[in-house]
Image (cartoon, coloured by chain):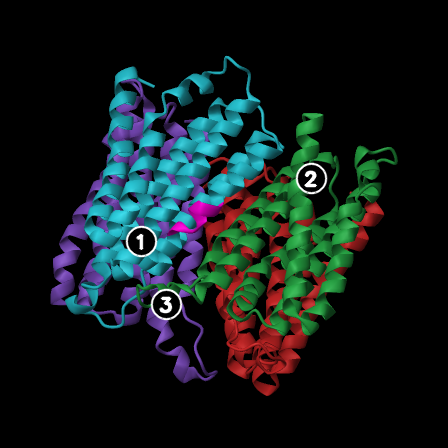
Chain colours: A purple, B cyan, C green, D red
Amino acid sequence: MSKGRLEAFSDAVIAIAITIMVLELKVPHGADWEVVRPLVPVFLTYVLSFVFLGIYWNSHHHMLHAADRINGKILWANLHLLFWLSLIPFVTGWMGENLASLPTAMYGGVLLLAALAYLILQTAIVAHQGTDSKLRAAVRKDVKGKLSAVLYVVAIPLAFVNQWIAIGLYVFVALMWLIPDRRIESKVGR
Amino acid sequence: MSKGRLEAFSDAVIAIAITIMVLELKVPHGADWEVVRPLVPVFLTYVLSFVFLGIYWNSHHHMLHAADRINGKILWANLHLLFWLSLIPFVTGWMGENLASLPTAMYGGVLLLAALAYLILQTAIVAHQGTDSKLRAAVRKDVKGKLSAVLYVVAIPLAFVNQWIAIGLYVFVALMWLIPDRRIESKVGR
Amino acid sequence: MSKGRLEAFSDAVIAIAITIMVLELKVPHGADWEVVRPLVPVFLTYVLSFVFLGIYWNSHHHMLHAADRINGKILWANLHLLFWLSLIPFVTGWMGENLASLPTAMYGGVLLLAALAYLILQTAIVAHQGTDSKLRAAVRKDVKGKLSAVLYVVAIPLAFVNQWIAIGLYVFVALMWLIPDRRIESKVGR
Amino acid sequence: MSKGRLEAFSDAVIAIAITIMVLELKVPHGADWEVVRPLVPVFLTYVLSFVFLGIYWNSHHHMLHAADRINGKILWANLHLLFWLSLIPFVTGWMGENLASLPTAMYGGVLLLAALAYLILQTAIVAHQGTDSKLRAAVRKDVKGKLSAVLYVVAIPLAFVNQWIAIGLYVFVALMWLIPDRRIESKVGR
């Protein structure tokens, strides 16, 4: 299994997931502001999910860039990650239409399982590289990956107390990935 | 016809099929556990189909990796395989919504025709390579490919006796491909 | 504009069109043979459109393989072809659901406009290559391309006499492309 | 982050957006001319959006072709552009179904935000290249990019006076990009 085809397939699945999400933003019947209002939460959830899928695409690329070799375990760990990412359009549509406790918790559940799938994939790749691989060093410092998972675990039960706390935590995780990445990169001039 | 473009096109079709399946998982109206219950069988069928498409993508890649040359016959045999794979989202949605005899038999029918299309493609590729190709040797030992087809033939009529027997056989085929592949690979260190 | 990216974009659009067509094959409510019957014409139209898109993908590849240089005119002629191909899922769904005169004529209309777009693209590519290009020689012999367009022109008004005559002509065109291609190739061993 | 994967991902998202738009062209129930009439504005909007996405794909390619290096800022500026492009199927469906003031203004709004996202991406790429890059020179002359944004700003409020003025301006922008590009290229023989 060549790395190139694994990357291309992952790119395609993420690109499709990120684009078909817009189909959950149903074209309203009518043309006044009243029909727009119920679309606002769907739209904002769409923005959040777009950012999450963008982060995954970005991180996925950096991780595979550092990998030299691919085996069957890595391939299935990758498909496992793509599985949870492919569910994001569904939970996006559901949370966006309701903004209620259960869909919000489910949204967090899919994010959590995607984050765990990512950690599993990371472990599978590191195990298959040499002991002094640069990926191993990078993973040891992957505080954000683990913190994200912890925040999802906290957010899911809190969604049943108040869904806005959970949504706030999801937004916080997204910003955590979005902002520092750019700052660090501009510093080290990567 | 270059092998690269055949692989890229096949990857794209499989990636789209695997991702648009989620559109059959309709966003429910309502936000309580009651609306989730009817989605459970649809979700589990989605998992099964995701695994099957993942297996096909994986096997397809290994097979084409071993092929040196492509001709028109291989190209159409490949499109024939993609045709049956493109129907998987449809039968997934139908079986998942009903879990009844006819949709379960139809699901098996599409799996059977995909399996036969795969064997036809394999034969077309082997016929076009040299007589001592490594693919020819690999195919002779392709017990799993033929056993899968036999199990589908058995499962389809049994779906009309009890759909759960057929579903059990489909799950068995999926596990047969999923588990040993990883075990063998970690042994031979491929 | 590199040829590679033009091919990749065309492949992606054709792969998506060929795969999302299955979404017009609506998952029926119910699980007996009665709900299957109205799906049969939709399914058969799906098969026909799948073959047409497969033929276009195949021919497109051969044509671009023979092209050395790309310019803006070729790029827009290619997008023009992709435009008509992107409408195939729509007319497939409409003809398949009704099998009536107007949708059948419209189906032929889209096929005709796609065929003309293909001829325009061919002309644009030939004009941009050297005078002794191998493509120029191949195009002069492109009887099938021109005959297909003529047959569509004949079929469209005949759809209003009897839609089955038109459908018969579409099937004839598809077979004309499907069968000899394979015969010629196996002879010349391409 | 390699440029190749950024291009491939962008191509995939644009190809998917351009192709799933056809799903907003709902297959009508019935088979006479009466059901076709309401589809005409949806179809024409589809044509317009297809042209806009084609222009973006074309321009995007030329811009990235001139870029030597990619960083995190460019990557997120690119995802930001893809975000607005991914909304085009939604506003296409809405404007096409209604041809009323609000959807027409929203359509212009998405075009405006895509145009601004494109300018931001251009700036990020130029800032990351050397001071004497050929892209910097090309951007200084990018009158069309800025004029397009200005025309959208003018069109959006005018949509509430009369939607046809706004639609006329959108068509004008599309033609402005479509026609001269080809004339210039045939002159300089690019």
Residue C180 bears which disc, if any? Answer: 2
Q: Depth check: D62 or C12 in front?
A: C12
Circle 1: element type: loop
Which region shows up in magenta?
Answer: B83-88
Q: Nearer the viewer, mark 1 or mark 2?
A: 2
Circle 2: element type: helix
Q: CA distance from mark 1 to mark 3?
A: 32 Å
Q: Depth check: D4 or D15 in front?
A: D15
User: Is the residue B180 above or below the residue C172 in the image?
Assistant: above
Q: Are marks 1 and 2 in contact (CB under 8 Å)?
A: no
Q: Amino acid at mark 2?
A: Pro
Earlier sequence position, callout 2 versus callout 3 = 3
Q: Residues within 10 Å of mark 3 (few under 14, many from 20)?
A: few
Q: Amino acid at mark 1?
A: Leu
Q: Residues within 10 Å of mark 2 (few under 14, many from 20)?
A: few
Q: CA distance from mark 1 to mark 2?
A: 44 Å
Residue A87 bears which disc, if any? Answer: 1
Query: Do pointers 2 and 3 mark residues of a single chain?
Result: yes
Image coordinates for residue C130, horizontal then vertical, percent: 85, 35
> Does residue A55 appear anywhere in the picture?
no
Circle 3: element type: helix
What residue is at 42 percent from the left and 17 percent from the top? B137
Q: Chain of mark 1?
A: A
Q: Residue furthest bottom?
A: D161
The answer to whether A13 appears left or right of C41 in the picture is left
Q: Are marks 1 and 3 in contact (CB under 8 Å)?
A: no
Answer whether residue B126 is magenta in the image: no
Q: Chain of mark 3?
A: C
The quarter holding residue D25 reads bottom right
